[in-house]
Image (cartoon, rainbow, N blue to C red):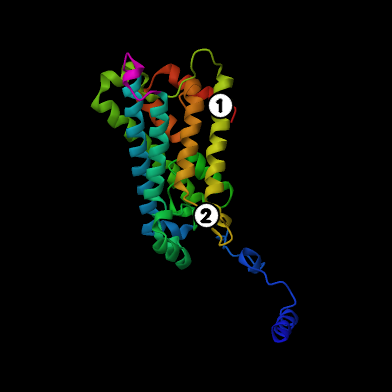
Amino acid sequence: MEGKEEDVRVGANKFSERQLIGTAAQSHAKDYKEPPPAPLFEPAELRSWSFYRAGIAEFMATFLFIYVSILTVMGVVKSDSKCSTVGIQGIAWCFGGMIFALVYCTAGISGKFLSPCCLYRLLLQLHFSVFGICDARAGGHINPAVTFGLLLARKLSLTRAVFYVVMQCLGSICGAGVVKGFQKGVYESNGGGANVVAAGYTKGDGLGAEIVGTFILVYTVFSATDAKRSARDSHVPVLAPLPIGFAVFLVHLATIPITGTGINPARSLGAAIIYNKEHAWNDQVSMLRPL
């Protein structure tokens, strides 16, 4: 027994300081790496195939997003009985689900700008599809509001931001045009999926709903793609497209009865151009003028 007590005393003297375990044992240095601020103009991008590939991905993603979502809206609006359709909840799920799927598919499409570390993570954890964590220039925006927010945060250059917005708007116009081409009569008689302020609400109400809804979406994008969220001391694995899509779903549930939910300038612009009715344009201009 005396020998054992001696061993205990020796051990206590040898390891007198409490040994840290878990995240407390990690160094205080940053365990994540922020990409450097993007320059305002980056002419070298214009000579890179990855730049145009990312733009094409933005076009295709926005095209598919508008095509599927407006078809869903048309299916609900044209029905006499809402019980036989997916209803407002189904429309909200459609918008949110499409954003989830398309962000997952198009994030990181511009692979040239991904660091080797991020590529290694993507290979090991393909199911995480870390949209924007490696570099916001990699694509998967599908929304000019998101692109503009990332531009202000210096996550991508002005050159790339303008190109993305143009491709997003073109994709939206083409998506709405294809829906109108398939069923013009139904499209024209049921509002064309254009965003208008509903009866009982003022244009100020519509403006406020769109500002708050867009803020929720962009805030979620920045939070879900923050490099610190993927650090090794984070206890919550980040599946970025999921919270982004879920935020779109929730905002649609809240604002469909007010404006039909825009929160995406490309989506609103494309539907308004193809539908091309005066009341749709009036509501669009009135909501955007104060901004």
State the count of labels: 2
Q: Nearer the viewer, residue 238 or 265?
A: 238
What is the quadrant of the N terminus in the image? Answer: bottom right
The reply to whether the magenta stretch includes residue 165 is: no
Residue at 44%, 17% in the rendered image: 279
Residue at 47%, 45% in the rendered image: 162
In the picture provided, is 43 more to the left or to the right than 53? right
Quarter of the image holding residue 48? bottom left
Indicate the position of residue 76 as horizontal and vertical percent values: 34, 22
Residue range corresponding to the magenta coloring: 78-87
The residue where tag 1 is placed is 209
- The reply to whether residue 172 is in sight is yes
Q: Residues within 10 Å of mark 2 (few under 14, many from 20)?
A: few
Indicate the position of residue 66 as horizontal and vertical percent values: 36, 34
> Of the residues shown, which amino acid type is indicated by label 1?
Ala
Numbered circle sitting on residue 105: none
Q: Is residue 119 above or below residue 220?
A: below
The residue where tag 2 is placed is 41
> Of the residues shown, which amino acid type is indicated by label 2?
Phe
